[in-house]
Amino acid sequence: METMTTLTSPAEFTIQRPNYSHTSAIRWVFSHVIRHNWVIVMVFLGAFGNAALAALVPVLVGDAFNAMLQPMPDTRALIPLALLIGGTQVIRGILQLGRNFGAELLGQRLEAEIRDELYISLLGKSMTFHSLQPVGDTMARATNDVREINLMFNPGMNLVIGSFFFLVMPIVAAPRYHPALLITPVLFAIAYFASLARYLKTLQPISDEVRASFGNMNSHLSESLDGVETVKGAAQEDSEVERFVLNAKRVRDAFIKQGDIEARFIAFLLYGIAIALGLTHALFLFREGLLNTGQVIAYFGLLRMLDFPTFTSSWAYTQVSMGLAGARRILELINRETDLDQNAAGHSAEMKGEIEFRNVTFTYPDTERAQRVSDSGESVLNSVSFKVKPGQTVAVVGQTGAGKTSLVKLINRTYDINDGQVLVDGMDVREWNLASLRSQISMIEQDIFLFSRSISENIAFGRPGATQDEVEAAGKAAQAHDFIETFEKGYETVIGERGVTLSGGQRQRLALGRAFMTDPRILILDDSTSAIDSATEDKIQRAISAAARGRTTFIITHRLSQIRWADLIIVLRKGRVAAMGTHDELMQTSDAYSRIFQE
Ligand code: UTP
Ligand code: MG
C-alpha cells in the first residue's frame, strides 16, 4: 500500500495524493519514478539485453574470422554463425524497442503526474502567493519545465542507461581474450566519468539559467499580451518589443553558453585515444603470440561499442541536466510557503451573517509598495472597527485607493490581517474552517472574471451539477435572463467564442446570478464601475436588492441610489473610517460623506 498524505501543508485547498518526497529535486523525481517499478525493470532489461547482444556481434565475427583462417577453412561453420548473428539481432531490436517504449512511457506518465501535482498545489496557494508570483512564470513552469522532465527520461535517461551498458560490455567481454585487454576500456570508463562529472558541474548553473531566462521571457510576454490594450492605448508597442527582444537575447545567450560547454566536452577525444591505444595494445599482444587474428578483430569490435556512450553523452546528459533544472523550478514552486492555513479542524457551521471588525490593521504582504507604506507607518487599513447585524446591508464608500476592496477581502480571508480581529458570528475568521467560511460568502469582484465556458457553466460555477431550471431561475433573479435570451444559443453561448464578449453591466448580472446559485449568508459586491445607462442601472439595482434580501450584504459603490437604502454606510478615507451611520445621519454630520457626492 502506498502511504497517502496531504500535499504541502499548510494550504488553502488539499487533495489526497501519494506521498512524494519534497526535499530535493532528485529525490522528488525519484519518488515519482519509483512508483512505476515494472516500467523501470523494462527499461533496464531492454538496455542490458540490447548491449549484451550488440557485444555478441564482434565476438561472433571474431570466431568467423578464426574459422576462415584455419589451414583448411570450413565454410559450413559460417552458416550457424550467420544465423546466430541474424537471430540475436532481431531479439536485440525487440529489447531496444522495450527500452525505448519504457522510457517514453515513463516520461509521459511523469509529465502528467507532475503536472497534476503542480496544478493541485497551485490551487492550494494563498492569494498572497498568487499576487506575488507572475502568471507567465508559473505558466512557463507548468508547461515547459514539466516538458523538460519528460524529455529527461526520453531521450535523456533512456540513452544514459542504454549507453552505460555499452560502456560496461567491453569491460565484461575483453578478459575473454586476455586479462590485460581490460586496461583500455577501464581507463576509458574512469576518464569518461571523471570528465562527465566536471561537465555536469559546469553545466548545472547554465541549465538553471536557461530555464530561468525562459520563464522570465514568458512572464513578460504574458503580461504584455494581457495588457495589450493598455500597451496599444499608450502607443508603447516599440518599447514592449524592445523589452521582449532583450529577454529573448538573454534566453539565446544562455543557450549559446550551454552549447559552448557541450562543445568543450572531451569525450570524443577520449574515444579516439581509446581506439588507438586499444588497437596498439592488441597488436602488441598479437606479435607476442598471446592473441590470434580473430581475437584482435573481436576486441577491436568491442572497443567500437564505446562510440555509443561517446556520441550520446554530451546531449543526453544535457537533457538530464535540463530536466533536473526544470524539476528544481517546479519543486520550488510547490514548496513555496503559502501563508494561509485552511484550518481543516476549524469551526464549521451554518453562518448567521454577523460581522465585526475590531481595530483592524492591514498591509499587503511583501510588495515593494507595502514596504514603502509600512516604512512610512501607514497601512492600507488602520484601526477599522464596525459591527453589522445578520441581514443588514452595508455600503462602503470612499475615494479610489481608500481601501474599500481591501476591507471586504479580509472577510473571507483572501488576505489575513496584521493586527486586530475580524469576526464572523462572533468567531475570529482564522478560527473558521476556511472552506466552510468561504462557501458561505459570495464575492463579486471589482473586475468580474468569466471563464471561457458557456453562460450556464459560468452561472453555476459555485454549484456544478445544478439543473437548467435552477440556472435560469438564477438568471432571472439576476435580471440577466433577457439579454442571455438574445444570444442565438441562449444559456449555452460560450463566452469569448466567436466574438461573444459581455459589457460591464452584463458581467455584473452574471456574477449576481452566481451569487443566487450558491445562496451565501454573506454577499459582497465590489461595484466600482459607475458609467452604466439608466435602464441597465435600474435592472442591476433590482437584481441587487433581490440578492441582498435575507443576507448580510456589503456593497462598494459610487451610486447614490444604492447607498441610500443601506442600513450602515462606512466612509473610508486613506484606510481609516472617516464617518459611519445611515444616509440621513451622515448627510448632516459628515463633510467627508457629502463631499463624495460632489466629485
Ligand atoms: P483598494 O483596492 O482597497 O482601494 O486599495 P479601493 O478603495 O478599492 O479603490 P477603488 O475605488 O477600487 O479604486 C487600497 C490601497 O491598497 C493598495 C493600493 O495601492 C491602495 O493604495 N493595494 C491594493 C496594494 O498595495 N496591493 C494590492 O494588491 C491592492
Ligand atoms: Mg476597489
Image: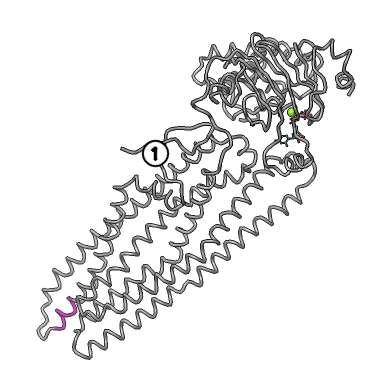
Q: Quadrant of ligand 2?
A: top right
As displayed, is residue 380 above or below residue 25? above
User: Of residues 554 and 528, which is closer to you in this image?
Assistant: 554
Secondary structure of the residue carrying numbered label 1: strand
Q: Magenta residues: mostly which secondary structure? A: helix
Q: Quadrant of the N terminus?
A: top left
Quarter of the rendering containing residue 74: bottom left
Which residue lies at the image location 55% right of the left edge and 61% below the top edge? 205
**Left or right relative to 30: residue 234:** right
Which residue lies at the image location 48% right of the left edge and 52% below the top edge? 148
**Residue 565: x %, y % from top left:** 77, 10
**Residue 368: x %, y % from top left:** 72, 44
Callout 1 crowding tier (Cα within 10 Å): few <14, some 14–19, many ≥20: some
User: Of residues 286 and 115, which is closer to you in this image?
Assistant: 115
Q: Which residues are magenta?
A: 63-69
**Left or right relative to 455: residue 59:** left
**Residue 550: x %, y % from top left:** 64, 8
As displayed, is residue 41 above or below residue 416? below
Q: Quadrant of the C terminus?
A: top right
Residue at the far bottom in the pictured view = 287
Quarter of the rendering containing residue 92: bottom left
Q: Which of the colour schemes (rainbow, by chain, secondary structure, one colour) is used? A: one colour
**Left or right relative to 215: residue 574:** right
Q: Which residue is mark 1?
A: 18
Magenta segment includes 292: no
Q: Amino acid at mark 1?
A: Pro
User: Of residues 434 and 37, which is closer to you in this image?
Assistant: 434
Which residue lies at the image location 65% right of the left edge and 38% below the top edge? 131
